[in-house]
Amino acid sequence: MKPASTTPTDRVPLHTRQITLQGYRRADGLYDIEGHLRDTKSYDRASNGVFVKAGEPVHEMILRLTVGRDMVIRDARAESVVVPYAGHCDSITHTYEQLKGMKLAPGFTRQVKALFGGVQGCTHLTELIGAVATAAFQTMSEEINASNTTKPFQLDGCHALKTDGPLVREFHPKWYRPTDDA
């Protein structure tokens, strides 16, 4: 069933969040995955004693994870470029080094919430972690799956690529697992 079309009524833009994710292969065989978050408003505003012009960032943060083919995080760097509470918001960035040694695997999100949830982290940097982790898989997918010795990580990761489905049967026959009723 197709969802109903949503035609917006007259409206005025107020807030824009841009998240850019980029993945790189490094010369040493590792991968750098960078997330960049930037929030802007469409109007001038004074907040916390600071005047911010329309289109200028209210928040701007960067998170870089260095990951191996084993999906273990070798390095983690966070940077708060623009924050509303200078000297406070940016004082937490060093805690994101705790990501070092963690593996991008089931249970990762639960670990992230335990380490950086609430007052233990920055909402914006913590939000970036999941997006950067997903970008790591996208960045490395061709090389990881090229070996054909382990099940491609995306199989059973979504409805379209369930291992008993037609797409897996056609494009990944080695990993196709029909159900009894198929």
Image (cartoon, rainbow, N blue to C red):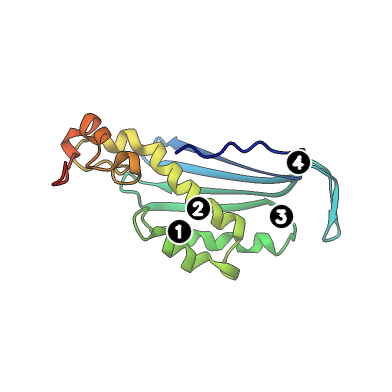
Q: Which residue is mark 2?
A: 129
For the residues carrying marks 4 and 2, which lies nearer the camera in this image?
4
Does residue 27 sit above or below 71 in this rendering?
A: above
Judged from the image, the secondary structure of the residue bearing numbered disc 4 is: loop
Does label 4 or label 2 sit earlier along the sequence? 4
Q: Which residue is mark 4?
A: 13
Q: Quadrant of residue 12?
A: top right
51 sits to left or right of 63: right
Q: Alpha-carbon neighbours of circle 3 within 10 Å: few (<14), some, or many (≥20)?
A: some
Amino acid carrying label 4: it is Pro
Amino acid carrying label 1: it is Leu
Amino acid carrying label 2: it is Ile
For the residues carrying marks 1 and 2, which lies nearer the camera in this image?
2
Could you tell me which residue is drawn at 54 percent across and 66 percent down? 117
Residue 171 visible from this viewpoint? yes
**Residue 99 bears which disc, if any?**
1
The reply to whether discs 1 and 3 touch (Cβ–Cβ < 8 Å) is no
Could you tell me which residue is drawn at 61 percent across and 52 percent down? 79
Does label 3 or label 2 sit earlier along the sequence? 3
Q: Alpha-carbon neighbours of circle 2 within 10 Å: few (<14), some, or many (≥20)?
A: many
Does label 4 or label 3 sit earlier along the sequence? 4
Q: Which residue is mark 3?
A: 83
What is the C-alpha distance between the residues marked 4 and 2? 27 Å
The reply to whether discs 1 and 2 touch (Cβ–Cβ < 8 Å) is yes
Report the residue that reaches farthest toward the left: 180
Does label 1 or label 2 sit earlier along the sequence? 1
